[in-house]
Image (spheres, helix red, strand yellow):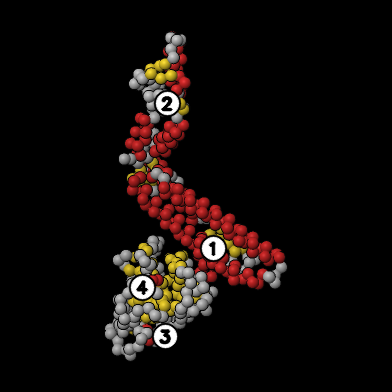
């Protein structure tokens, strides 16, 4: 049922049978029928003028007797009538009084068929409201998700960096500590403002088609242009105005401070993999005769990095743009190597996967499909060992892809890569 039909039916139910208008201050009588308060009182007063001795009166609809003191105000019906008025106003063109069946993509507003023929909208692209609604709803939901994820990760990094330098504050003067508190208070305030904006976007998504599309381009524009004041990760004295793109720059800058030099370990490589001499490039090739050892993958075309991690924060980048399919992340030393297992945390893997057939997926149990605005070109892997977090980022934008969270790690974690046909991987060296 479309909006126009719904409004029509609601108006029929909320129309006073005496004045034939939407009820004003509706009141109910004993039989259950409702009328405008002034309308039913007018009938009572007229009958009392003609027959002053009357103590009961006939319902204008069903003729059931009722007494004057039985009138009951219907607040809920009054609220419903106000909603009907709002819906009627919302779904009709203010200029022409016609239903807003079309959406003008150039102006970002719902219009009626009369508007479509005016010079103002001549040459513009118009689509049906029911077709525009899911498209713009998805855009708002995706933008809400990206903003929320980006700010959450920024907040996490700043919070962790704050903890790491707290021990130095004991020897510094009170002004330094005050600046730190002010920075944190500012961050919390801006996070609160962000949450309010996210709720605004969510409310739009949950509303009607016309409500979502009303000023939708302005909403998207305001979201993209949001500005926040962000303290630098380490320096407590410098603050800078930054938009969302600049926030990504801050995330990249923080990640780069933990970048390590990861190369591939040929002793772990499956027989069908070919590694470059410098240990940075790996591709799927013909069967290679290699000496068997307990660390080599036998079932799947996988390889590990030479460097393992037992503590601290570490970050490395993998160039994945030459192929369409890959799996990468971190794993434990004792993961199965002679049989085909799903690389999930339960089996000692913290891995995401990209495939042409189903896009990007976090290999959890069950797997989680990841809605990304664009296919990653370079994937950054960040390990916070003590915090039990393995995070993935799309570079060079610095946008967050996914984070695995564990209570803690206790064993060595190794960079993990699965290679698909025609999809080589290249490990990038740290920036100098």
Marks 3 and 4 close (CB-CB < 8 Å)? no
Q: Are marks 2 and 3 in contact (CB under 8 Å)?
A: no
In the rendered image, residue 29, in percent from the top left (x then y), is placed at 41, 24
Cα separation, mark 4 vs mark 1, equals 29 Å
Q: Nearer the viewer, residue 129 or 208?
A: 208
Instruction: Point out the tag, 3 or 4, that comes first from the N-terminus.
Output: 3
- The mark found on residue 278 in the picture is 3
**Residue under the point 34% across and 46% down:** 130
* Front residue of this view, candidates 176 and 113: 176
Asked if one can make out residue 315 in the rendered structure from this viewpoint, the answer is: no
Q: Secondary structure at mark 4?
A: loop
Of all residues, the one furthest to the left in this rendering is: 287
Q: Which residue is mark 4?
A: 343
From the top left corner, tell me how far across and down residue 396 is, in percent. Answer: 46, 69
Q: Secondary structure at mark 1?
A: helix
Q: Earlier in the sequence, mark 2 or mark 3?
A: 2
Which callout, 3 or 1, points at the residue further toward the start of the chain? 1
Q: Quadrant of residue 235?
A: bottom right
x, y percent for residue 97: 39, 34
Residue 205 image offset from top left, x and y in percent: 42, 49
Mark 4 vs mark 1: in front: 4
Q: Residue at x 37, y 33 (%)?
A: 10
Give the SS element for disc 3.
Answer: loop
Gap in angstroms between the C-alphas marked 2 and 1 = 55 Å
Q: Residues within 10 Å of mark 4 (few under 14, many from 20)?
A: many
Q: Residue at x 49, y 62 (%)?
A: 150
Spot the residue most to the right: 173
Residue located at (38% from left, 24% from top): 31
């Amino acid at each position: 049922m479309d909006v126009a039909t719904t409004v029509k039916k609601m108006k029929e139910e909320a129309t006073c049978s005496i004045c034939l208008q939407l009820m004003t201050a509706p009141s109910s009588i004993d039989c259950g029928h409702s009328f405008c308060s002034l309308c039913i009182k007018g009938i009572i007063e007229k009958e009392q003028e003609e027959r002053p001795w009357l103590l009961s009166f006939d319902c204008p609809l069903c003729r059931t007797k009722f007494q004057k003191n039985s009138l009951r105000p219907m607040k809920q019906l009054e609220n419903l009538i106000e909603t009907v008025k709002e819906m009627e106003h919302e779904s009709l063109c203010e200029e022409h009084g016609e239903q807003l069946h079309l959406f003008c993509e150039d102006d970002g507003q719902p219009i009626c068929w009369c508007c479509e023929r005016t010079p103002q909208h001549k040459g513009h692209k118009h689509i049906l409201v029911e077709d525009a609604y899911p498209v713009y709803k998805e855009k708002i939901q995706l933008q809400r998700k990206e903003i929320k994820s980006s700010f959450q990760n920024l907040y996490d990094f700043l919070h962790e960096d704050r903890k790491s330098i707290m021990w130095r504050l004991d020897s510094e003067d009170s002004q330094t500590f005050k600046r730190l508190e002010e920075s944190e208070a500012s961050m919390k305030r801006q996070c609160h403002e962000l949450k309010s904006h996210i709720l605004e976007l969510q409310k739009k998504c949950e509303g009607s088609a016309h409500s979502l599309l009303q000023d939708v381009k302005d909403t998207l524009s305001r979201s993209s242009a949001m500005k926040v004041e962000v303290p630098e990760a380490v320096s407590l004295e410098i603050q800078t105005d930054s938009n969302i793109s600049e926030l990504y720059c801050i995330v990249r800058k923080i990640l780069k401070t933990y970048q390590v030099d990861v190369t591939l370990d040929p002793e772990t490589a499956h027989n069908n993999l070919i590694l470059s001499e410098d240990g940075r490039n790996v591709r799927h090739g013909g069967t290679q005769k290699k000496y068997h050892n307990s660390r080599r993958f036998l079932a799947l075309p996988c390889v590990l990095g030479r460097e393992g991690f037992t503590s601290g924060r570490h970050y490395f980048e993998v160039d994945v743009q030459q192929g369409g399919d890959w799996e990468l992340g971190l794993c434990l030393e004792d993961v199965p190597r002679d049989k085909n297992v799903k690389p999930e945390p339960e089996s000692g893997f913290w891995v995401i996967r990209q495939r042409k057939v189903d896009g990007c997926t976090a290999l959890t149990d069950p797997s989680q499909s990841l809605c990304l605005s664009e296919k990653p070109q370079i994937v950054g892997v960040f390990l916070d060992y003590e915090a039990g977090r393995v995070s993935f980022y799309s570079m060079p934008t610095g946008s967050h892809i996914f984070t695995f969270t564990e209570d803690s790690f206790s064993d060595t974690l190794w960079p993990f890569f699965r290679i698909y046909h025609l999809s080589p991987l290249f490990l990038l060296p740290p920036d100098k």
